[in-house]
Image (cartoon, rainbow, N blue to C red):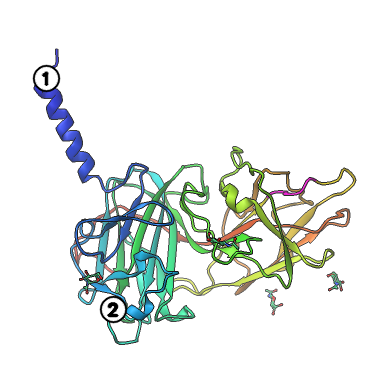
C-alpha cells in the first residue's frame, strides 16, 4: 500500500516540475525578449501566453523601443528587446523539449531606435546550437528603424534542449525582440531530418485581399505565420466558406483551412500565374538551393464539362507534375521539392493551364525554404569553448 504522504510528495514534485517546465500546456515556448519583471501576458490576437526571457538567458540588457515606433499595428512583443553589447556569442537555452522531435523556431527583431542612435546594426548572425541558421540583415528591411525582421527555421532537436545564439560578426550590437518554439508532428516537412533543417524564405496565403489578415495560431495549430498575397491588377481572388480538408495522409504540410479557403487566379483567363524569387547569398553559399512547396485546392464546384488542369514550371523547366494537375474540390494537396533545387540566382515560377483545360490555373499558398546542415544541434557549449 502506498502511504498517503508519498502521494502528497509526488504531487508536490509534479507541481515543481510543471513550474520548472519552460513549455506551456501545448508544448509551445513564447518569449517576449527584454520584457521587464517576472510576469508575462496573454497575446491579444493568438491568446498565447508570452513570458519574459529571464529564465532563458542571463546576459544582455533590456530596452524599450522609442515611443514613436509604438505603432498600433505592431504586436506588444516588439515594444521591448534584449541587446548584447558584450561577448561575441550570447545564447538562449530552450529546455523541456522532446528529444528527437521536429520544432519550428522563430525569432523577430524590431530595432525601433531603442538606443536613440537611429542606426540599426547592419547585420549579425543567428545560430541554432553550433549551426549557422541565418544572417539577420536589418538594412534589407524597407523601414529598418521601426520595421520588424522575422526569421524561422524548422529543425529536429536531438536533445531535450536547444540553444539559439546571437553572434556578433562586427556589424553592430545584436538584439532580439521575441523567440517562439512550436512542436511539429514528425511527418510534417519530410525534408527536415536530423542532418538538415529548413530556413524560411517566404510563406504566403494567396488570394487573401485583406492586407491585415494574417493567419497564425489558433487558425494554424502549428502557429506558422501566413501573410496575405494578392495583387488585384493581375489576379482575381477566389474564396469559399466551405471547410478545406487537409487530413490526407499524403499531405505532409497541412496548410490550415483558413489559408486554403482563398486562392488566386489570373485576371486574364488565358494567362498564367507568374511569380519569382531571387537567391539570397549566404556566407557559406553564394547561390543556395531552394525547396518550394505549393498548396492547391479547388474552391469552385466545376461544371461537368469544364476542366481545370495546369502544370508548373520553374525557369521554363517542368516542375513536380509530369502531366497536368487538377486540384480536388475542398481538399488540399501540395507540390514540393524533396531536395533543394539550385537553378541560378533567380527562380521564375509559371503556373499554366494545359491545352485541354477550360479554366485558368489557381494557387492557394506557397512556401519557399533554403536548407541548413544541423549537426550537434543539442550540444551545449561553454562560452569561449567553440569556434565561430
Ligand atoms: C520600459 O517601459 C516599461 C513600461 O512602459 C517600464 O516599466 C520600464 O521601466 C521600461 N524599461 C526600460 C529599460 O526603460
Ligand atoms: C481584415 O482583417 C482584419 C484582421 O483580421 C480584420 O480586423 C478586418 O475586419 C478585416 N477587414 C475586412 C474588410 O474584412
Ligand atoms: C491574355 O493572355 C494571353 C496568353 O498569355 C495573351 O496572348 C493575351 O494577349 C492576354 N490578353 C490580355 C487582354 O492581356
Ligand atoms: C526571370 O524573369 C526575369 C524577368 O522576366 C528575367 O529577367 C530573368 O532572366 C528570368 N530568369 C531566369 C533564370 O529565367
Chief secondary structure of the magenta portion: loop
Coordinates of residue 96 in the picture (x, y in percent): 28, 45
Decide: is 372 above or below 187.
below
Coordinates of residue 114 in the picture (x, y in percent): 30, 79
Asked if residue 213 is among those painted magenta in the image, a careful observer would answer no
Quadrant of residue 11 within the rendered picture: top left
Which residue position is annotated with label 1? 4
Q: Residues within 10 Å of mark 1 (few under 14, many from 20)?
A: few
Q: Residues within 10 Å of mark 2 (few under 14, many from 20)?
A: many
Coordinates of residue 5 in the picture (x, y in percent): 9, 23
> Between disc 2 and disc 1, whose residue precedes?
1
SS under mark 2: loop
Q: Quadrant of ligand 1?
A: bottom left
What segment carries the magenta color?
297-301
The one of 188 and 47 positioned closer to us in this rendering: 47
Q: Going by the picture, which residue comes out furthest to the top?
A: 1
In the image: residue 164, left or right of residue 194: left
Q: Are marks 2 and 1 in contact (CB under 8 Å)?
A: no
Which residue position is annotated with label 2? 173
Decide: is 173 above or below 55.
below
The one of 184 and 189 positioned closer to us in this rendering: 184
Q: Going by the picture, which residue comes out furthest to the right?
A: 305
Amino acid at each position: 500500500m502506498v502511504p498517503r504522504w508519498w502521494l502528497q510528495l509526488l504531487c508536490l514534485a509534479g507541481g515543481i516540475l510543471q513550474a520548472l517546465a519552460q513549455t506551456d500546456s501545448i508544448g509551445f515556448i513564447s518569449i517576449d525578449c527584454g520584457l521587464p519583471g517576472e510576469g508575462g501576458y496573454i497575446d491579444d490576437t493568438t491568446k498565447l501566453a508570452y513570458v519574459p526571457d529571464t529564465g532563458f538567458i542571463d546576459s544582455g540588457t533590456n530596452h524599450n523601443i522609442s515611443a514613436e515606433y509604438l505603432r498600433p499595428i505592431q504586436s506588444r512583443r516588439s515594444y521591448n528587446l534584449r541587446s548584447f553589447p558584450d561577448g561575441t556569442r550570447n545564447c538562449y537555452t530552450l529546455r523541456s523539449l522532446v528529444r528527437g522531435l521536429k520544432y519550428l523556431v522563430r525569432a523577430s527583431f524590431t530595432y525601433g531606435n531603442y538606443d536613440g542612435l537611429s542606426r540599426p546594426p547592419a547585420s549579425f548572425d543567428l545560430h541554432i546550437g553550433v549551426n549557422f541558421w541565418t544572417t539577420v540583415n536589418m538594412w534589407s528591411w524597407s523601414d529598418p528603424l521601426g520595421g520588424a525582421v522575422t526569421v524561422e527555421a524548422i529543425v529536429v532537436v536531438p536533445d531535450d534542449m536547444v540553444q539559439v545564439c546571437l553572434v556578433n560578426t562586427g556589424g553592430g550590437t545584436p538584439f532580439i525582440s521575441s523567440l517562439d518554439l512550436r512542436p511539429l508532428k514528425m511527418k510534417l516537412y519530410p525534408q527536415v531530418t536530423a542532418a538538415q533543417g529548413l530556413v524560411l524564405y517566404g510563406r504566403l496565403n494567396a488570394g487573401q485581399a485583406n492586407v491585415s489578415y494574417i493567419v497564425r495560431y489558433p487558425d494554424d495549430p502549428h502557429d506558422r505565420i501566413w501573410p496575405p498575397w494578392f495583387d488585384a491588377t493581375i489576379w482575381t481572388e477566389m474564396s469559399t466558406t466551405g471547410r478545406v480538408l487537409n487530413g490526407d495522409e499524403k499531405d505532409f504540410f497541412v496548410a490550415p483551412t483558413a489559408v486554403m479557403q482563398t486562392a488566386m487566379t489570373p485576371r486574364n483567363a488565358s494567362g498564367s500565374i507568374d511569380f519569382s524569387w531571387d537567391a539570397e547569398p549566404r556566407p557559406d553559399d553564394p547561390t543556395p538551393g531552394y525547396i518550394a512547396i505549393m498548396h492547391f485546392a479547388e474552391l469552385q464546384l466545376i461544371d461537368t464539362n469544364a476542366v481545370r488542369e495546369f502544370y508548373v514550371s520553374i525557369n521554363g523547366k517542368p516542375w513536380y507534375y509530369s502531366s497536368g494537375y487538377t486540384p480536388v474540390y475542398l481538399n488540399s494537396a501540395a507540390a514540393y521539392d524533396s531536395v533543394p533545387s539550385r537553378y541560378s540566382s533567380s527562380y521564375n515560377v509559371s503556373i499554366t493551364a494545359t491545352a485541354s483545360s477550360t479554366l485558368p490555373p489557381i494557387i492557394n499558398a506557397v512556401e519557399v525554404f533554403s536548407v541548413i546542415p544541423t549537426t550537434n544541434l543539442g550540444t551545449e557549449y561553454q562560452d569561449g569553448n567553440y569556434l565561430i
